[in-house]
């Protein structure tokens, strides 16, 4: 017997990757932790959540840490505290992101990621899908990554990591100029790892060649890449032009000007919002972002719920803002969530205040895990 939730709005993923819609009002039926049906209007005998928009929960493809926790060094308590914090902000799946380091430093970090993933599943915390390695195989636009740590990609090293810890690495950001012959891009794509182009001054043709080799993401569009020029479109131009590439965007409105955020959504059907949140320990936090001592942007301090509110504020329709933080990243990773699959997907949901879009409740597998007491949907 399904439980049915109704609300002032229900955001529903589009069929077969099509555009999302928001039913006002709408309803969701949940059984055994899965969304089995959705519809418009008020369903009879439903549990009424009130003046909220019930939506697929958020998926963060790039989050380095939160508050005082850096995923590169986090202990078990840090992982749990950060998982609860992300859940409070509507995130139910994420890729902890590890920035450039010496190659011999990654093994212990990836072991901790694997342990944290198992712990999260046991303790009903957001799903740790797998690590996002942002470096050290980066190129001419390192940003906050120390140049002395950057190096050409090693397909042999990457293969060894994948063999040693199957499924632990899910995304790798590479610069085309740091991947001679695109050997690592091809290896990762063949092994089911999502390859992102980033921290690069590659030209348009080189990025297209990376897409030919299997790259499918572009890491934080407009940041960590050469400028887009009318005679040299570069990484950003390829990201907006090539349908195989899905650009991610940091929408704290500090990393990217609101006009450029709006431009990305205007130019591209599939855009992914990422937080790029970082631990603020040892960084200067000012102007709404975290900076190195020399003023270089080091990362964001807001999470995906704020990113959704920000893009709506600059003119992006609510349905598109929600899917950019849920359905589209979920499909990039091949998740089994409602956002990624629609009906039949896992009932990971967030209830957003209809006026402020602040999270009011979050469900994992159809069970409410945070927010004020709202109806349960255990199925």
Image (spheres, rainbow, N blue to C red):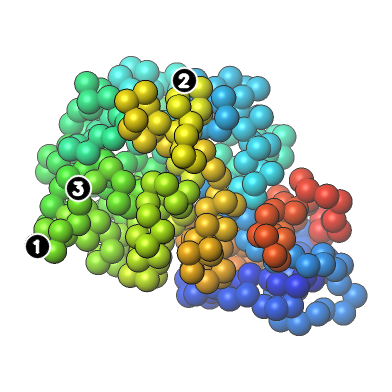
Quadrant position of residue 377: bottom right
User: Mark 2 highlights which residue?
Assistant: 282
Q: Is residue 129 visible?
A: no
Task: Kindly report the distance in space between the C-alpha atoms of the residues bearing marks 3 and 1.
Answer: 13 Å
Say what secondary structure mark 3 lies in. Answer: loop
Observer-nearest of 283 and 94: 283
Q: Earlier in the sequence, mark 1 or mark 2?
A: 1
Residue 336 percent location from the top left of the image: 57, 56
Which of disc 2 and disc 3 is earlier in sequence? 3
The picture places residue 154, in percent across and down from the top left corner, at 21, 31
- Residue under label 1, please give it: 231
What residue is disc 3 on? 226
Image point 53% across, 64% down: which residue?
A: 312
Q: In front: 209, or 272? A: 272
Residue drawn at x 29%, y 67% is: 243
The residue at 25%/56% (across/down) is 236
User: What quarter of the picture does the C terminus occupy?
Assistant: bottom right
Residue 31, compared with residue 300, is above or below; it is: below
**Label 1, label 2: how far apart the Cα atoms are:** 40 Å
How crowded is the residue under tag 3: few (<14 C-alpha within 10 Å), some, or many (20+)? some
The residue under the point 69% across, 53% down is 359
Residue 258 placement (x, y as % from top left): 41, 59
Local secondary structure at mark 2: loop
Identify the image quadrant of the N terminus.
bottom right
Q: Relative to residue 257, is residue 167 drawn left or right? A: right
On residue 355, the disc is none
């Amino acid at each position: 017997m399904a439980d049915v939730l109704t609300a002032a709005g229900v955001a529903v993923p589009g069929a077969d990757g099509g555009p999302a819609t928001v039913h006002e009002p709408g309803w969701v039926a949940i059984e055994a932790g899965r969304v089995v049906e959705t519809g418009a209007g008020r369903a009879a005998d439903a549990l009424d959540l009130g003046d909220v928009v019930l939506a697929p929960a958020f998926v963060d493809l790039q989050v380095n840490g939160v508050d005082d926790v850096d995923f590169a060094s986090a202990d078990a308590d840090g992982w749990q505290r950060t998982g609860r914090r992300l859940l409070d902000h509507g995130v139910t799946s994420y890729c902890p992101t590890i920035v450039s380091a010496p190659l011999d430093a990654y093994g212990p970090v990836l072991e901790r990621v694997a342990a944290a993933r198992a712990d999260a599943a046991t303790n009903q915390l957001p799903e740790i899908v797998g690590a996002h390695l942002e470096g050290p195989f980066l190129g001419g636009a390192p940003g906050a990554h120390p140049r002395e740590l950057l190096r050409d990609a090693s397909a042999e090293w990457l293969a060894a990591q994948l063999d040693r810890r199957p499924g632990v690495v899910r995304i790798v950001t590479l610069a085309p100029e740091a991947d001679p012959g695109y050997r690592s891009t091809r290896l990762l794509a063949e092994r089911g790892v999502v390859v992102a182009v980033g921290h690069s001054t590659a030209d348009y043709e080189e990025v297209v060649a990376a897409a030919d080799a299997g790259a499918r993401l572009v890491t934080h569009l407009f940041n960590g890449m050469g400028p887009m020029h009318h005679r040299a479109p570069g990484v950003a131009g390829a990201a907006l032009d090539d349908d195989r590439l899905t650009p991610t965007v940091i929408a704290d409105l500090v990393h990217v000007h609101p006009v450029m955020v709006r431009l990305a959504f205007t130019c591209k059907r599939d855009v992914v919002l990422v937080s790029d949140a970082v631990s603020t320990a040892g960084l200067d936090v000012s102007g709404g972002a975290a900076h190195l001592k020399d003023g270089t942007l080091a990362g964001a301090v807001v999470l995906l719920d704020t990113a959704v509110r920000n893009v709506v504020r600059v003119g992006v329709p609510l349905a598109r803002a929600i899917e950019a933080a849920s359905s589209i990243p979920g499909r990039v990773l091949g998740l089994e969530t409602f956002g990624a699959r629609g009906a039949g997907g896992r009932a990971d949901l967030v209830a957003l205040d209809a006026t402020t879009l602040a999270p009011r409740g979050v469900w994992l597998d159809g069970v409410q895990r945070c927010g004020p007491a709202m109806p349960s949907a255990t199925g």
